[in-house]
Amino acid sequence: MGKLHFPPAADLTTADKLVLAHLQKDFEQIDSKPQTVPVDAAEESDDSLTKRTEFVSPSPEDTHESEQQTIAYLKNLNNPKSDVFETTVFSAWDLPDLKNPILRKWIIDPYVKWAKGIVRTETDVIMITHLLTYLCTSIPSALYLFYNFHWWHGVLHSAVQLYYMGPYTLLMHQHIHMRGVLNKKYALIDTVFPYIFDPLMGHTWNSYFFHHVKHHHIEGNGPNDLSSTIRYQRDSVLHFLHYVGRFYLLVWFDLPRYFLRNKKTSLALKAGGCEIANYIFLYSMYKFVNPNATIFVFLIPLALMRIALMTGNWGQHAFVDEVEPDSDFRSSITLIDAPSNRYCYNDGYHTSHHLNPLRHWRDHPVAFLSQKQQYSDEHALVFYNIDYFMLTITLLSKNYEHLARCLVPMGEQMKMTMEDRVEMLKRKTRRFTEEEIAEKWGKQYAKLK
């Protein structure tokens, strides 16, 4: 009988708890067989009157029926027409957990009703919560720093922005894929707010859209992807520093050049123009307005965000299958953890996102469970109780044993020993040679001499 190494985190979302429970149940059933005692042997035994309890594993039909019930329930949670529909309002608390009748009647319920009319999808009230939070904290703080700068305020401001960066980036992740998050009648606000908040959160104007949507999802971590991990040894600190450093220093040049190389002149001009315009804005604020405030309001968030983006992408695509490296199932991973899914819009379901980039963030858990058998057949990797940042740190420290303990085995992985899992993970972090790239993707993608 299989058993996961760690207890699930207490603050998992409802969907994550249900998904992980089904994966745990599958693992527990492996090699589980009813233990029967022959009647004649029992009759002859000295303790034949002792009651024996058998473990009987659920039948495949029972397991399938239970999964279908969970899938139906999760779909109804996301369906505004269902009686069990539940919008997301806050990151840290689920709406049913807020039971104070006065708070619900006079503050939360009226707010939810109002916010539902502003967001494009009724599940997304949390986006209004976050945008209002940034509007009421980040902007006044930044303005006051430019008006009356103090070092302690600058440090505090940058620290708060660092806390905001993850949720904001994943809010924008939904925004750039769905071309907005607000109701169509608020299209102007939907278009304008990224130009205000992006620089405060460390993004340059439109760079996330051009790099992620128009580039990364086209190349899919393949050889031509500027953020591809395949040419790097993913447990090497030196390779990681090279990976981050190249993006840090050259993305402003590499991305437009990529578009030009692929005869997408318009995208090249837009990507390069937005990047340069943002740098001119930052230089002007530093040179002519307030250099100290510019450092803490814009430059420190920019420096931190670029590290965070590459650290996250490294973790998302650290494990690439040596047999089918171009498979979305085998070149990305799934995380079931609170930092990624509760606080960052189900960012842990990265494989699901690559399978369907337009899938709404609330639909990832139910999509995963609906395709669970295919994930298993395709040897996909699922981890729990670890986020992308800690996965990258753990990998760079070569602590494969901990990563193996965080693995949620599926399919053939369930039969592996801990040592087998460690060796499997090591194989999937090995860099691809140019000869292997030519074999797997085609000679036109390899840098052969």
Image (tube, rainbow, N blue to C red):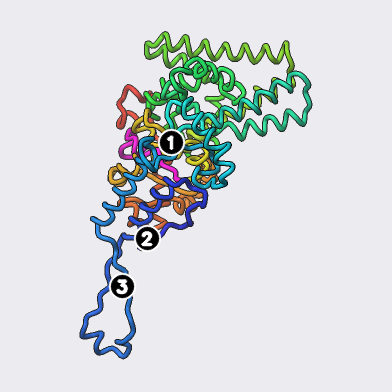
The amino acid beneath tag 3 is Glu
Can residue 242 be seen in the rendering of this structure?
A: no
Q: Alpha-carbon distance for marks 2 and 1?
A: 27 Å
Q: Alpha-carbon distance for marks 3 and 2?
A: 17 Å
The residue located at (29%, 67%) in the rendering is 56
Mark 1: few/some/many CA within 10 Å (<14, 14-19, 20+): many
Mark 2: few/some/many CA within 10 Å (<14, 14-19, 20+): some
**Callout 3: helix, strand or loop?**
loop
Residue 85 lies, in percent from the top left, at 40, 40
Sequence-wise, which precedes: disc 3 or disc 2?
2
Please report contact status of discs 2 and 1: CB closer than 8 Å, yes or no.
Answer: no
- Considering depth in this image, is 207 or 50 the residue closer to the camera? 50
Q: Alpha-carbon distance for marks 3 and 1?
A: 43 Å
Sequence-wise, which precedes: disc 2 or disc 1?
2
The residue located at (66%, 28%) in the rendering is 137
Residue 372 lies, in percent from the top left, at 31, 45
Q: Nearer the viewer, mark 2 or mark 1?
A: 2
**Callout 1: helix, strand or loop?**
loop
**Residue marked by disc 2:** 2
Q: Indicate which disc residue 317 carries.
A: 1
Can residue 106 be seen in the rendering of this structure?
A: yes
Based on the picture, tell me whether residue 331 belongs to the magenta stretch: yes
Which residues lie in the magenta part? 319-336
Quarter location, residue 354: top left
Quarter location, residue 48: bottom left
Q: Indicate which disc residue 54 carries.
A: 3
- Name above or below for residue 19 compared with residue 238: below
The residue located at (63%, 30%) in the rendering is 161
The residue located at (35%, 41%) in the rendering is 76
- Name above or below for residue 35 compared with residue 76: below
Residue 410 lies, in percent from the top left, at 34, 50
